Image (spheres, rainbow, N blue to C red):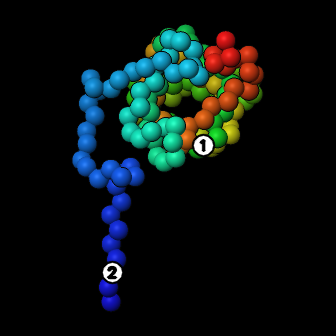
Amino acid sequence: MKILTVLMSHQPGQDVFKTILPENIEWKPFEAFPPSVRLATVVGQPSKKGPYTIRVKVPHGVKLMPHKHPEDRVYTVISGIFYIGRGDQFDAEKLLAYPPGAVIILPGSTSHFHWAKSGEYISQVTGIGPLGIEYVDSNDDPRKG
């Protein structure tokens, strides 16, 4: 009996060992977020089909108003306190606080919001692209301004 072994790389077409050190992460503005928020692509190409990992750095006081993503997402808190609430309207009473190391699974199309209430936070997001974001109220979308 022959056994077929298939080795799968972590990204389509990428079969090399790779490391990414924190000082080599390239933070950039992201048009769908408020101007002070920064996003870094760590693995993959979020705008294309396939797995991706990004990091999002949100400065103290910034709110990401209710929005949803078509793809399922896994958030890992890297630093700071990550506040997230579910619903179509921003409601500080619905926010839950997660410390570094916490993992949050968010099913696709779930309306939610964030607030860097107690200081800057960095979260790492893993999903299967293409990444999408739609604000519940289009007036909250920075791309519309």
Q: Which circle's residue, 1 or 2, is located before the other in the chain?
A: 2
> Which quadrant of the structure image shows residue 138?
top right
Residue displayed at 38% across by 34% down = 42
Q: Is residue 18 above or below residue 100?
A: below
Helix, strand or loop at disc 2?
Answer: loop
Residue at (67, 12) in percent of width and height = 145
Q: Quadrant of residue 113?
A: top right
Circle 2 packing at 10 Å, graded few (<14), some (14-19), many (20+), is: few
Give the amino acid type for the residue marked by disc 1 in the picture: Glu
Q: Is residue 37 left or right of residue 11?
A: right
Question: Mark 1 and 2 residues: CB-CB less than 8 Å, in contact?
Answer: no
Q: Quadrant of the N terminus?
A: bottom left
Query: Where is 141 relative to 18, above or below?
Result: above
Q: Is residue 89 left or right of residue 6?
A: right
Tell me, yes or no, if residue 84 can be seen here.
yes
Q: Residue at x 34, y 77 (%)?
A: 4
Image coordinates of residue 47 in percent, x first then y, are 52, 37
- 85 and 50: which is toward the camera: 50
Q: Which mark is residue 71?
A: 1
Between marks 1 and 2, how big is the CA–CA gap?
34 Å
Mark number displayed over residue 61 = none
Dot 1: what SS?
Answer: loop
Whether residue 73 appears in this view of the structure is no
Q: Position of residue 83 (x, y in %)?
A: 56, 24
39 to the left or right of 89: left
In the image, what residue type sits under mark 2?
Ile
Residue 3 image label: 2
Q: Nearer the viewer, residue 67 or 113?
A: 67
Residue 10 locus on image (x, y percent): 36, 51
